[in-house]
Image: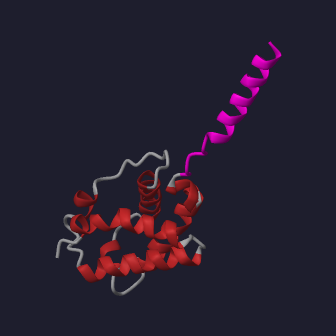
Amino acid sequence: MRFFVMCVIVLLAIGCVAQTKPEATLYQRIGGLPMLTRVSNQTLDIVSKDPQTSRSFEGVKMKALKESLANFLCIKTGGDCVYEGETMKNSHADLHITTAEFERMVDVLRERLDVNGVATKEKNELLKILAPMKRDVVTN
């Protein structure tokens, strides 16, 4: 009986050691909603005032846009936020966004991620997720 108990204990210990901790989601590794909100707010503050991109933000309710962007990024990185906004294609359809404007937004986002200490791996993962959206955003 004692031998049996020892075997069970050893097997349980081995099982505990063998279990690997699941990798954290990009959302968790990037810093969650607080980081995504900070980066979104900073990015939109800059591009909404930048002469290269400001025309796209005329008449936009920035508070609502900031919240929507943070929630969008949350969902895209594996968070459990609720995004109630339009698709990228629908929300940008009539804005006539150019490639230069899109690239400026990406540059500012990349800079804000860097300034806020987001690691290169996580920054690149996020940019890779967002890159295919260019075809839905750029219409000019």
Is 95 rendered above or below residue 18? below
Quadrant of the drawing holding the C terminus: bottom left
Return the residue found at the far front.
3
- Residue 91 lies in what quarter of the image? bottom left
Q: Is residue 15 magenta?
A: yes
Measured as percent of width and height from the top left, residue 56 is found at: 30, 74
Is 75 rendered above or below residue 102? above
Task: Pick whichever, 11 or 16, lies toward us.
Answer: 11
- Tell me the residue at 73%/24% (across/down): 7
Return the residue found at the far left.
140
Task: Pick whichever, 8 or 132, lies toward us.
Answer: 8
- Secondary structure mainly formed by the magenta segment: helix
- Tell me the residue at 72%/23% (across/down): 8
Q: Is residue 11 magenta?
A: yes
- Residue 77 lies in what quarter of the image? bottom left
Range shown magenta: 1-24
- Tell me the residue at 23%/57% (across/down): 90
Measured as percent of width and height from the top left, residue 80 is found at: 49, 45
Quadrant of the drawing holding the N terminus: top right
Is 13 rendered above or below residue 64? above
- Please state if 65 lies on the left or on the right of 135 as rendered: right
Measured as percent of width and height from the top left, residue 34 is found at: 59, 59
